[in-house]
Amino acid sequence: MDRARRGLLLGLAAAAGLPAMAQQQQGGAKPIRIVVPFAPGGGNDVFARQMAKGLGELRQQGVVVDNKPGAGGNLGTEQVVRSAADGSTLLLGHTGTVSINPALYKGLRFDARKDLVPVAMFASSALVLVVPAASKIRSIADLVAEARARPGLLDYASSGSGTGGHLTGEYFAQRTGTRINHIPYKGTSPALTDLAGGQVQMMFSVVPPALALVKGGRLRAIAVTGAKRLPLLPEVPTVAESGLRELAGFESTLTYGILAPRGTPEAVVKELSAQMLEVAGGTEFQARLDVEGAVPLLGGPAEYAALIARESALWGGIVKTSGATAA
C-alpha cells in the first residue's frame, strides 16, 4: 500500500477519536469474533480468516473466526444481530445473507439491513457461466438463440435454491425474455458433476470449483457475470460483452464485507473500518482474492450501505418477479 493511502486510513482512525491502529491496542483486550454464517472452506470463510489474520496483526489483539452455518446464513447472521454492540462480534457479510435473504425468507425475526451497520466492504466475486465441453453453445448469443428456439427445454443447475447462481439464472432469463428451468442441487460439486456429464445444460457457478473443470477440458466457460473480465479467465468475455441489447450493462456479483450489530458506537465502527481497509488493501489479502476469483472492492460504511441498498433493490425485485423460494 502506498504512503498516501496508508496516511489516509490512519487519518480516518484518528478522526474517530480512538488510538491509531494497533500501536496503542492492549494485548489483553477482549478478542474480536468474526462470525461466518456458512461452513468452513468456502470463499466466505477464506476471506474472513485472511481478514482476521491481518486485523489481529494490526491491532495486536486476538481476532477469531467462528463458523455458524444454517438456514442459508440466517442462523449466524441472527446471532450477530443479537450480540453486544461493542465491536467485539462482527459478521462476514455476503450478498446472499444481507441483500437476498430478506426477500427470500418469510418470517425472519430480524432485518439484516436494519439490525446491522456496515463497517467495510472489501471484495466482489463474479460467477462464471459454464456449459459441457461437448455443448454446441459457445457464446451468450448461441445460448439465447437456443433458449428462444427451445423455450422451457434448457436446464440450468445451481448449488441450491435461493443462491446467487439460482437468482442469476432468473435474472438472465428475465433480461433475455427466455424460459429456462432451474435444477437445484445440494452443493456446487454435485451440480458441476452433472453439468460435466451433460445432465443439465448450463450453470452460473462460483469460479474456483468450475475453473478446475474448465482447465481439465470437461466444461467450457462462455461468460463471466461481472462488469469486467476476470484475471483468472482473461479470455472469457463478460455477459454484457455479448453485444445483445437486452444484456447491455448486465452484472451479477456477490460482494463481501464486515458488519456490526446496530448500535455499535460510531467511533468503533470508524476505527475498525480504517483498519480493515488497510488490511484489504494489502498485497497479501489481494493475492488471496485472486486465488478465489474475486477482485478488490474497497469502501467504508457509507459506500457499503449504498451498495447493500442497490443490491437489495435488484435482488428483491428478481425474487418477487420470479417467485423464487429458499426451499
Image (tube, grey):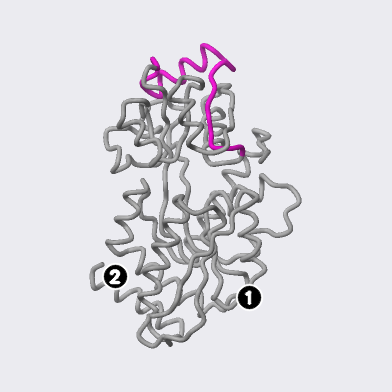
Characterize the local packing of mark 1: few (<14), some (14-19) or many (20 or more) Cα atoms within 10 angstroms. Answer: some
Three-letter amino acid code at disc 1? Answer: Ala
Asked if the residue at tag 2 contacts the one at tag 1, i.e. Cβ–Cβ closer than 8 Å, the answer is: no
Q: Which residue is mark 2?
A: 5
* Image location (x, y in percent) of residue 219: 37, 26
Q: Is residue 258 left or right of residue 220?
A: right
State the separation of the CA atoms marked 1 and 2.
32 Å
Image quadrant where one finds the N terminus: bottom left
Q: Is residue 151 left or right of residue 320?
A: left
Q: Residue at x 40, y 35 (%)?
A: 210
- Camera-nearest residue between 280 and 197: 197
Characterize the local packing of mark 2: few (<14), some (14-19) or many (20 or more) Cα atoms within 10 angstroms. Answer: few
Q: Residue at x 63, y 75 (%)?
A: 84
Q: Is residue 118 visible?
A: no
Image quadrant where one finds the C terminus: top right
Q: Which residue is mark 1?
A: 84
Query: Which range is magenta?
Result: 135-161
Three-letter amino acid code at disc 2? Answer: Arg
Q: Nearer the viewer, mark 1 or mark 2?
A: 1
The first of marks 1 and 2 along the sequence is: 2
- Camera-nearest residue between 188 and 120: 188
* Image location (x, y in percent) of residue 23: 35, 85
Query: Is 141 included in the stretch rendered in magenta?
Result: yes
* Image location (x, y in percent) of residue 220: 36, 26
